[in-house]
Amino acid sequence: MRYTDEQIRASIQLAEKIAEQEMRISVFEKAGMSPDVMESARENIGGKLGNLLDDPLAEKLLPQARIAVRMHQARELSIEQTKLGRLIEAAGHQSSIEEEGEGWTGKTTSEGFFPAGIEQDEWRRMVAALKRGDKGALFDALSSLLIGCKIDLVHTELPPTAPVYRIPK
């Protein structure tokens, strides 16, 4: 049978959602989550499994999706440990501080805290430019931080990307 690109994308998406839910349930079981949490997770996957019965391509792709989801997760966890991942985390944390009404402090969790592995001078320069509203200096500092992230990524060995799906005929 010939599948359209749209059918293939939808089937892969469904298969990956099921694989992610299976993985989540496994993590919950290992962590000893409460019966309510486990039941909710099982209900969530149950609804998706019903869709799987209506999508024979997704059912055929599920074994590949399980592999792809594990590989995506391993890669994402590795990227979180790079300078880029730490910069994103710090910016998100700083954003949440600002949203909570504390205003832009230039700090994250405590006085003098800087994202691990990020140049403190560049971080300070970026926060100061942001406080002043100096867009040119802000983008200059951000550019310097991102160049450091790029260099770090070039020298970081990341897990491989997931293989391309083999679409059955």
Image (cartoon, grey):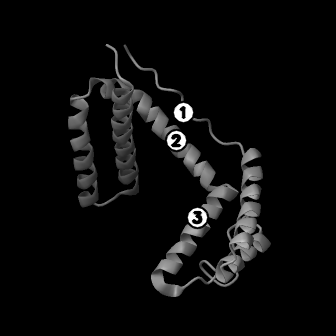
Give the mark nearer the N terminus: 2 vs 3.
Answer: 2
Mark 1: give few (<14), some (14-19) or many (20+) Cα within 10 Å.
some
Give the mark nearer the N terminus: 1 vs 3.
Answer: 3
Decide: is 7 above or below 111: above
**C-beta proximity under 8 Å, tags 1 and 2:** yes
Q: Quadrant of residue 112?
A: bottom right
Q: With 60 as the anchor, is 51 left or right in this view?
A: left
Q: Which of 55 and 99 is in front in this view?
A: 99
As shown in the figure, which amino acid type bears the numbered disc 2? His
- Residue at label 1? 162
Residue at the (63%, 39%) spot, across then down: 159
Give the mark nearer the N terminus: 1 vs 2.
Answer: 2
Q: Which of 47 and 140 is in front in this view?
A: 140
Spatial CA span between label 2 and label 3:
19 Å
Decide: is 152 above or below 134: above
Q: Is label 2 in a helix, a strand or a loop?
A: helix
- Residue at label 3? 89
